[in-house]
Structures are given as structure tokens and as C-alpha cells.
Amino acid sequence: MLVCAISASACDPLWKISVSQSLERPLDDNCVVRTLQSSEQIRSVKRNGKAHLVAVLILPPTIRAPRSEQGGGEGAFEVLQSQPEEGKIEFTFRMVGVGREGDAEFRRYVDETLTKLQAATVNACSRQADG
Amino acid sequence: MIHVAQGASGAASGGVSQQKQLEFAQAEYGQRFSNGSTLASVGSFARDTLGRIWNSPNTVVGTAYGVLGIPTGGIGYEYGQLQFKGNLLQWLLSGGGNGAITLGDAGIYPPGFGPETIQFSGLPLGLEESFHSIQGRILGPFYLPAHVAFGTSAALANGYWHGPVNLLEQGPHPANYGSYPTVF
């Protein structure tokens, strides 16, 4: 009971918008970085440890970020490649934040944009791996 | 003292270098390396130690919670906090995993998230959570009552616990990308 009360009072709720694809082999990080950087919707992409990239998504003026009074701005998301089982790679784009999640328009925009960016990345970097 | 982790998990986040993180964290807690005198170092050490002692009741609760909750992702030490990762109790109590908590100098994370998780703000979650530890070193045993008071006020005024009135949640978690956290 005490733990529940404590947890409720000091807990930071996390929202996330995540898109994933299962791949047969990992994508080359350099290709992922190049492909994302070539998108007009991406401000920057940086390495953040092994199998972990961080990209910054540009939000259009019509989209209001969570806890923001006005539209526009930027938000970071993670690009992760994990191996949940032998012979499978989980390629994930994940945006995470603390507090109240954004409105439906924000969530839809981020979900659709991350899905498109991921598909373009897989398309470009799978072809490179095959070639 | 805030310890910004070395290595991959605490490395530079989206656009914010590790050195920059360290600088603003130190500055926020009233510690600046620029002085560099022995007296300043002793003062910083004393303030840090006293803060941790004052915060220890919260740390005891946090550590017990972290251990008893079964940290399936292991226990670590980053950003001046004990880190309990993949905590099953936290997963259960936060309604399916989407919630992190700092109690004293202990950070507790559900499976799927950790101190290295990069936030919308571009900062690692562990860095943001460490500012709750600084709150605890200032407020001591009043930390949890203060959270209840501010959270209740925000719930009444803003309609939700982490609303703008809840100063204890606004500072550590910047709303905008590229902004730095503050204690309050």
C-alpha cells in the first residue's frame, strides 16, 4: 500500500511512439545515418553507443508537441537494432517522453513519419546489403 | 555530485555533449569547476555528502523498492544514482511498464526503458531523473510529501498530476528539444 502511494506520487509516466520491423540481418549504421540525414524531416542523426542512434525529427508548425503551447519545434527519437532471437533483427524507431502524451494529431504525425522514414531506410540499406 | 556516466550508455545524447551535460548538471547543483580551489572542492564534497545523508530515508525506500521489485535488467550506478533496471514491480505498478521513478538516490526503471533511454528532449532519461535526486538532497524527508502536495495541486488546477503547477516535475523534464533540466 505504501509502495503504491509512493509510486503514484513520484512516478514519471512515460509515453512512447514506436514503429518496428523484423529484418533478417542488421543494417549498416553508416547507411542508416546517411539515409535519415538525407530526409528533409530530419535535423540531425548521431551515434549514441552500440546499435543505438539518435535522430532529431522536425515538427511542422501545424503540429504541437506534448506540453508545448505552440506548433513546430523538434523532438529526438531513438533508432535501435536489437536481436530478440537468433536470425532475427528488430529495427525500431522509438520516441519517448515524460508526462502527458501529445494530442492525437501529434501522435498520428509522428507515427506516420517514423513509419515512412523507417521504410525508406530499410529499402535503401537492405538493397545496399544485398548488393 | 552528479556523475555523468562514461561509456556507451551515458555518452553524448542527441545534440548534447557529455561535457555539456556535466557542466549544466554541476552548475545547477551549485557546483562549478571553474573555481577549482581546494576550499571549493571541500565545500562541494561536504554539501554532496550532507545532501545524500539528508536524502537517505528516501534512498532506503528506493533501494528496497528497487531490490524487492526484481531488477531483471540489473543494478548499476550512473548519474549519481543507483539504477535498478527492468524492475518488475515498477512495471506492474505503472500499469504495464510505462513509468520510471526516483526515490532518493535510487532510480527505478521498468523493462524496456533505462537511464540510457533518450527522451523527446534529446537527453537521457537517467540524467533527467537524477534531478529528482537533487530535489531529494534539498528536501530530504519532505521530498515525498512535497511531491504529493505539488501533484495534488496540479491535478486540481491542471487536471493532471504532472501539470504546469507541479514544479517538482517541470524542472527535471524539459518540454522542448535542446532545453536543459533544472531542479525546480
Image (tube, grey):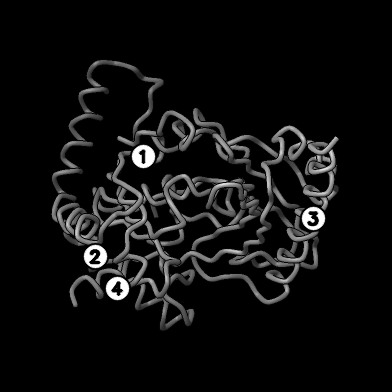
Q: Viewer-proximal residue, B115 or B160?
A: B115
Q: State the residue at coordinates (55%, 32%).
A: B17
Find residue B47 and report its horizontal and vertical position in percent: 21, 36
Q: What is the C-alpha distance between the residues marked 4 and 2?
A: 9 Å
Mark 1 or mark 4: which comes first in sequence? 1
Return the residue at label 3.
Answer: A119
**Mark 2, mark 3: which one is toward the viewer?**
3
Mark 4 or mark 2: which comes first in sequence? 2
Looking at numbered disc 3 in the image, what kind of residue is underneath it? Ala
**Mark 4, mark 2: which one is toward the viewer?**
2
Within 10 angstroms of label 1, few (less than 14), some, or many (20 or more) residues?
many
Instruction: Mark 2 and mark 3 in contact? Answer it, CB < 8 Å.
Output: no
Return the residue at label 2.
Answer: B144
**Mark 1, mark 2: which one is toward the viewer?**
1
Q: State the residue at coordinates (80%, 68%).
A: A62
Looking at numbered disc 4 in the image, what kind of residue is underneath it? Ala
Return the residue at label 1.
Answer: B79
Q: What is the C-alpha distance between the residues marked 3 and 1?
A: 36 Å
Write down the chain letter for disc 2. Answer: B
